[in-house]
Image: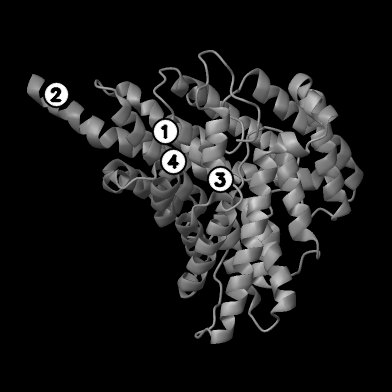
Amino acid sequence: MRRGRARGRRLFLRYGLPWGAALIVGLVAVLYARWSEDAYELFLHWIDGRAWLAFLITPAMTMLAVYLTRRWFSGSEGSGIPQVIAALHAPPDDTLMSRLFGLRVIVGKLGVSLIGFLGGLTIGREGPTVHLGAAIMAETRRFYPHQGRHLERALLLAGAAAGLSGAFNTPLAGVIFAIEELARDFESRTNGVMITAVVFSGLTSLALAGNYLYFGQIVVPNNFHFSFILPVVVASILCGLSGAAFNWALLRWEVWMPAPLRGLRAHQPVRYALVIGLAVAALGVLTHGQTWGSGYDQARNLLDGKTEVGGLYALTKWLAMVISYMSGMPGGLFSPSLSIGAGLAQWMHWVFGSAAMPVLIALCMAGYLAAVTQSPLTSFVIVMEMTNGTGMMIPMMAVALASARISNMFTPPLYEALAEKNYFGLKHGAKPAQAPA
């Protein structure tokens, strides 16, 4: 009897617990996607025909989100991916996990980011889903009798990969993301817990949301002519420089931000949030609503050929994304980055009119995301899986690799730099730096 109970407990710890946690991650990813869409739709409903209301709603929601983040949910700020990197690579610290993960951070990540969507800010849900997945999976370590760095690392990687897989319905990208962006080592290729977590999270997503393509099916030419090399080169340069500029803006905000605003940020964060909210509202009103939200609708409509966006969409969306991230509230950058890439593709189409618009969008989405994250494999695999664009594999790979290399000439990898700047060497009891993460 005792031997049977011991064997049952071993099986539960080896299979039942991680499988169950992965199912929860998938469920949370699907629910979070629905809640964020509902929150943004509610914002659009509020301001429908009354755009001036954005000057009240967006600042109010921004102030509330910043106050809650600073007061109760420190550690939940930004996308959450730098927090995962810090937990994986920072020097040993017994208190780091409690400051950056746990139930408090899970609640803050979900609740406060939804407030951001309710205010129409330019944030995404994919990075937060990675943080949520890692936090949920990491909580299971409490049930294991022998805890240690190896177990903690395996659970964080598994949860992060499952989170990205559930957010985009891209299981392959989830695995590559965990290896390339988070772990950056060969050892993780043998992490069975990670693969299993991605599978079970993906199964949950399939059961609840169906086998969908995030951006729909793209139609690509059967043959790419030699002349297509030039658009690939131009897209690489354009995306690489744009992504480097975004990274520089987030990492060197002390350089370009006016001194009075820096003072507000440091000493009066709620008043600082008011300025942020007003700026986001102004951009949204000036662009007739195109810069509000994650940008998913604009990118999807461009891919489907239903409509064009304004000629300055890529620039104004870039500005809205920088401003939103400077608030320090929870929110991701994947969807806005893909949307900016789609806007850059419209510029490309004005020059290379003979190239199919969906092809240019796929190139620029992969290129800009790769330039920001400097994780080219993850970037082109995400776009390929989201659009079923296997026919675009080689051009997307080329643009992603070149854009990431160009960006790296000017700025370090964004997530790693934010992790090192905000969380490495954080003293016991200290709060994380309220810079975008």
Q: Earlier in the sequence, mark 2 or mark 1?
A: 2
Label 4 sits on residue:
160
Secondary element under disc 1, as helix, strand or loop, is helix
Q: Which residue is mark 2?
A: 6
Q: Residue at x 73, y 33 (%)?
A: 254
| Circle 3 crowding by C-alpha within 10 Å: few under 14, some 14–19, many from 20 | some
| Pointer 1 or 4: first along the chain | 1
Crowd band around label 2 with a 10 angstrom C-alpha radius: few (<14), some (14–19), many (20+): few
Determine the secondary structure under disc 4: helix
Tag nearer the camera, 3 or 2: 3
Name the residue: 19% across, 33% down. Answer: 11
* C-alpha separation, residue under disc 3 versus residue under disc 4: 22 Å
Q: Of the residues under marks 3 and 2, which one precedes in the sequence?
A: 2
Check disc 2 and give the amino acid type. Answer: Ala
The residue wearing badge 3 is 412
- Residues at circles 1 and 4 in contact by the CB criterion of under 8 Å: no
Q: Which residue is mark 1?
A: 89
Disc 4 to disc 2, C-alpha distance: 30 Å
Whether label 3 touches label 1, CB < 8 Å:
no
User: Is residue 134 placed above or below 358 in the rendered structure?
Assistant: above
Q: Earlier in the sequence, mark 3 or mark 1?
A: 1
